[in-house]
């Protein structure tokens, strides 16, 4: 599962799924709601749990219909589990109103049943174009409140890369690599919130900003054998952010930095709500930072 973890490092992922229970139920060959020759059998529900993963809709253009899933990674085993729901159901509509596609979503009070991996209905789920392939599928029966979460790493002042140590200096928030300044003193505090190898570069995400008017802005600092590149500051001002490395065949690897839209506290509440239901995605790839395919200009 190393490739899955590389694509989906959810820094604050919490998994309360009993994998032992999954194995027992899977071996029994149970599928909720599916007709069997012998009898129609429902798998027992797992204990109520909190699920923290990213939300995705698959099969949008598939004649078999759409399905939604919240994908969660176990910090203990690295196994990927999909909690499946119907986007058109009352539960699905509620989840989609509280979370945003392709962003981390924390769902409380989840009731779910394991789905039989050998059943045709479950096999179809794997053919609907989801970006990842889970080890197990669970059908959501019900859930409580849900919300978008940030999924960055714990803020750090110092990290080790393949090319040396990057450190944020106390006092003036300048950034140095192996003791040499690569980012001059900043007016606001700076923290390193993501550190990931992206091809031949080690890419760091720097966060600054505070307060309610603009809680967060970001910069990319990319370190390689050729030197250091620092991007302009960017962001929607939201601090609900998910940065994931995408490494696909025949394509240069990239870091996708996804965040919610943002409307400030002095904007009408309806505008704030609408903004928070949109995802803004910046992409860093081979020295270039883009938004909607266009280079992000220097400020």
Image (spheres, rainbow, N blue to C red):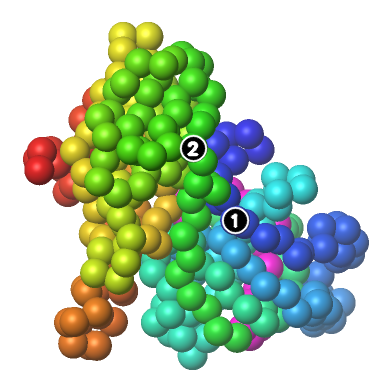
- Say if residue 7 shows up in the picture: no
Q: Is residue 276 above or below residue 236?
A: below
Q: Residue 43's spot in the image, x, y percent?
A: 81, 76
Packing grade of label 2 (10 A; few <14, some 14-19, many >=20) is some
Q: Which of 78 and 66 lies nearest the eye of the viewer?
A: 78
Question: In the rendered image, which residue does mark 2 sit on?
Answer: 157
When the figure is inspected, residue 53 is found, relative to residue 273, above or below; the finding is above
Q: Which residue is mark 1?
A: 12
Q: Residue furthest front?
A: 171
* Residue 115 included in the magenta stretch of the image: no
Label 1: element kind: loop
**What residue do we see at 48% from left, 79% from top?**
95
Depicted 142 relative to depicted 169: above or below: below
| Residue 292 locus on image (x, y percent) | 17, 48
Q: Along the line of sight, which residue is nearer the eye, 289 or 37?
A: 289
Q: Position of residue 228 (x, y in %)?
A: 30, 19
Q: Is residue 232 in view?
A: yes
Instruction: Give the spatial CA distance, label 1 vs label 2.
Output: 19 Å
Marks counted in the figure total 2
Q: Nearer the viewer, residue 82 or 32?
A: 82
Q: Which residues are magenta?
A: 128-143
Residue 239 falls in image quadrant: bottom left
Q: Is residue 284 above or below residue 100?
A: above
Q: Quadrant of the C terminus?
A: top left
Horizontal side, residue 269 vs residue 250: left or right: left
Q: Residue at image x 51%, y 41%? A: 156
Please indicate whether residue 208 sits to the left or right of residue 83 in the image.
Answer: left
Describe residue 143's horizontal placement relative to residue 46 as left or right. left
Q: Residue at x 56, y 70 (%)?
A: 106
Q: Nearer the viewer, mark 1 or mark 2?
A: 2
What residue do we see at 42% from left, 43% from top? 191
Q: Which mark is residue 218?
A: none
């Amino acid at each position: 599962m190393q490739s899955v973890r590389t694509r989906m490092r959810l820094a604050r992922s919490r998994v309360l799924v009993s994998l032992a229970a999954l194995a027992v139920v899977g071996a029994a060959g149970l599928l909720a709601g599916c007709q069997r020759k012998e009898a129609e059998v429902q798998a027992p529900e797992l204990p109520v749990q909190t699920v923290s993963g990213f939300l995705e809709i698959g099969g949008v253009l598939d004649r078999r219909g759409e399905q939604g899933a919240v994908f969660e990674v176990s910090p203990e085993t690295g196994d990927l589990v999909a909690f499946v729901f119907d986007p058109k159901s009352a539960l699905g509509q509620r989840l989609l109103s509280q979370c945003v596609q392709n962003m981390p979503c924390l769902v409380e009070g989840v009731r779910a049943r394991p789905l039989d991996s050998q059943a045709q209905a479950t096999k179809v789920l794997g053919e609907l174009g989801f970006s990842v392939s889970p080890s197990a599928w669970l059908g959501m029966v019900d859930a409580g409140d849900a919300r978008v979460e940030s999924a960055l790493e714990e803020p750090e002042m110092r990290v080790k890369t393949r090319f040396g140590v990057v450190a944020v200096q106390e006092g003036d928030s300048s950034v140095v690599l192996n003791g040499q300044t690569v980012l001059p003193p900043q007016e606001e505090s700076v923290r390193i919130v993501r550190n990931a190898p992206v091809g031949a570069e080690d890419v760091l995400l720097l966060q600054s900003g505070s307060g309610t008017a603009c809680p967060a802005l970001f910069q990319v600092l990319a370190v390689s054998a050729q030197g250091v590149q620092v991007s302009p500051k960017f962001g929607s001002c939201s601090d609900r952010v998910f940065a994931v490395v995408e490494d696909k065949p025949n394509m240069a690897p990239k870091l996708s930095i996804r965040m919610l839209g943002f409307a400030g506290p002095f904007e009408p509440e309806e505008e704030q709500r609408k903004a928070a239901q949109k995802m803004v995605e910046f992409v860093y790839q081979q020295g270039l930072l883009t938004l909607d395919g266009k280079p992000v200009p220097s400020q």
